[in-house]
């Protein structure tokens, strides 16, 4: 049974078995390899994509549950260069091995869109489902706070 | 295993359709709600059912109704939506905390109340002890009709429930009680709690406890009320140190389950601290 969905603005159809994890469809069938299958148990967040605007662990989402949904992966997050959070992560030298970053960016993009002026604890709580084994998180948290701080500056 | 005549996952549009699909599939079929338990079956070395019926689009499963004396929660309500909907309701703070602190944000957006209550092999389900303290009842639907039973009775029967049945909604009582949910995960980042203690306490004008409900999760295979601690808390004013002492005296009645995350004795040993924290959250 094929599954229709929109992926990064394009209509796509998956021919895979309906219980196939969305992450495998995105990577193996649509060749969008940004999201990473790391733990496959919803713990690490490296596979996070947006489904109808919500950060979703694509390793635990059967593709049929994404049927008729709007899926956005890291590849489709912006059509004009890096987003604010991506730029801040780059400027802050926050990226090390990069495995967790596609998921981090999806989670933080959604979080910052819904929590424009977060404090440090709120950023940390938002990242409890995105595990990074390289950085110790501080630069990632700083980057998120810098995006929020930059917005506040912009309004002054 | 012979392949099923049905697809591995069929997404049902309505309750009637889901019940029909489950009846057709018989022992081959099983409901799939958020999938956060089912999709990890390979990691637990468990076989998945051959023919799932997806509930994510069943109309009405996502409803939450807050009335003066009770609340109705559809089986498809996610942990995230439940936490958000109950955020400002004083007597339901225990349930709000259970929903809002379980797992991690993305899993909370997918995992459902129905999945949490129906997973017989999941001892650490946060919503179960919180709902036991609210004297919750569940509705179970099949093609033959709807049955309503206490959450306790459902927990005792759920492992042997006949195929073709669905938990459709939960009814929990509201009151002037205040509730809290104390849990101990080893790390904050999405670990299952080693032990859980939920509490709902009603006090008179002088601050004396007139009714206490306490439930313990994750310590034994299935969550249950703790009547001896409830009795010990009833009568005097609420006090965190006395609750911890009473829990220390009474904790021996639990037989902690062994697990890779923690040994059984440890789950029991942390209960007095959780009792103290739950009471402190109510003061
Ligand atoms: C990394 C991670 C951490 C987690 N941590 C916690 C935690 O700390 N606390 C916690 O409580 N939970 C936690 N969970 C979530 C746990 O998986 C869910 O709480 C819940 O047990 C599953 O809900 P679901 O909707 O995803 O169920 P599913 O996986 O869809 O189904 C689970 C079971 O319930 C059955 N089922 C589902 N809905 C119904 C229904 N309406 N009627 C009859 N049967 C039904 C299914 O057939 C299946 O047997 C965690 C999950 C992950 C991935």
Image (cartoon, rainbow, N blue to C red):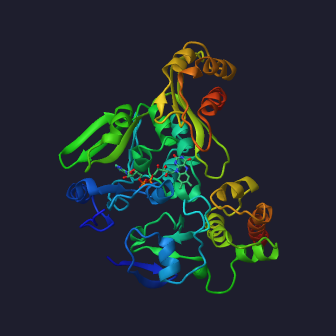
Is residue B15 something that shows in the picture? no
**Quadrant location of residue B93?**
top right
Position of residue B85 measured from the top left corner of the image (x, y, whole percent): 49, 48
Q: Quadrant of the N terminus of chain B?
A: bottom left
Image-based side of B145 in relation to B186, left or right: left
Residue sitting at 58 percent across and 81 percent down?
A76
Image-based side of B148 in relation to B176, left or right: left
Numbered marks: total: 0
Looking at this rendering, what residue extends furthest in the front direction? Answer: B1
**Quadrant location of residue B51?**
bottom left
Position of residue B49 measured from the top left corner of the image (x, y, whole percent): 34, 58
Image-based side of B170 in relation to B28, left or right: right
Position of residue B148 measured from the top left corner of the image (x, y, whole percent): 28, 37
Residue sitting at 32 percent across and 48 percent down?
B168
- Above or below, B244 against A29 in this view is above
Q: Nearer the viewer, residue B49 or B54?
A: B49
Q: Nearer the viewer, residue B185 or B238?
A: B185
Is residue B93 something that shows in the picture? yes
- Above or below, B241 against B161 in this view is above
Position of residue B218 measured from the top left corner of the image (x, y, whole percent): 53, 37
Q: Nearer the viewer, residue B262 or B179?
A: B262
Q: Quadrant of the C terminus of chain B?
A: top right
Looking at this rendering, what residue extends furthest in the left direction? Answer: B144
Residue sitting at 68 percent across and 47 percent down?
B187
- Above or below, B180 against A155 in this view is above
Image-based side of B8 in relation to A82, left or right: left
Looking at this rendering, what residue extends furthest in the right direction? Answer: A92
Looking at this rendering, what residue extends furthest in the top direction? Answer: B235
């Amino acid at each position: 049974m094929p599954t229709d969905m929109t992926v990064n603005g394009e209509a796509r159809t998956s021919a895979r078995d309906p219980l196939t994890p969305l992450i495998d469809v995105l990577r193996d069938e649509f060749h969008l390899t940004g999201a990473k299958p790391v733990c496959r148990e919803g713990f690490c967040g490296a596979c996070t994509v947006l489904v109808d605007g919500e950060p979703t662990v694509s390793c635990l989402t059967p593709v049929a549950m994404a049927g008729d949904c709007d899926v956005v992966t890291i590849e489709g997050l912006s059509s004009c260069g890096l987003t604010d959070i991506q730029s801040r992560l780059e400027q802050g030298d926050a990226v090390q091995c990069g495995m967790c970053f596609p998921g981090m960016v999806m989670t933080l993009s959604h979080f910052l869109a819904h929590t424009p002026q977060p404090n440090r604890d709120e950023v940390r709580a938002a990242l409890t489902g995105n595990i990074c084994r390289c950085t110790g998180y501080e630069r990632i948290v700083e980057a998120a706070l810098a995006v929020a701080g930059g917005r506040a500056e912009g309004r002054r | 295993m012979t392949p099923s005549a049905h697809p591995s996952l069929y997404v049902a549009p309505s309750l009637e359709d889901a019940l029909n699909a489950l009846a057709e599939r018989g022992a081959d079929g099983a409901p799939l709600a958020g999938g956060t338990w089912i999709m990890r079956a390979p990691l637990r070395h468990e076989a998945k059912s051959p023919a799932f019926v997806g509930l994510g689009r069943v109309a009405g499963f996502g409803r939450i109704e807050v009335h003066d004396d009770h609340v109705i929660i559809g089986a498809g309500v996610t942990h995230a939506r439940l936490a958000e909907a109950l955020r400002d309701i004083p007597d339901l703070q225990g349930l709000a905390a259970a929903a809002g602190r379980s797992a991690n944000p993305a899993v909370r957006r997918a995992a459902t109340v129905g999945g949490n209550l129906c997973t017989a092999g999941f001892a650490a389900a946060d919503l179960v002890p919180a709902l036991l303290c609210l004297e919750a009842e569940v509705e179970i639907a099949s093609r033959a009709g709807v049955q309503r039973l206490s959450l306790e009775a459902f927990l005792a029967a759920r492992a042997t429930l006949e195929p073709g049945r669905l938990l459709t909604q939960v009814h929990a009582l509201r009151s002037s009680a205040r509730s809290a949910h104390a849990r101990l995960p080893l790390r904050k980042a999405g670990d299952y709690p080693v032990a859980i203690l939920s509490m709902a306490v009603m006090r008179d004008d002088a601050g004396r406890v007139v009714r206490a409900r306490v439930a313990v999760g994750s310590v034994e295979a299935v969550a249950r009320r703790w009547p001896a601690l409830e009795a010990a808390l009833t009568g005097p004013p609420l006090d965190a140190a006395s609750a911890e002492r009473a829990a220390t005296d009474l904790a021996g009645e639990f037989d902690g389950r062994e697990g890779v995350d923690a040994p059984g004795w440890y789950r029991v040993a942390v209960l007095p601290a959780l009792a103290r924290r739950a009471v402190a959250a109510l003061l």
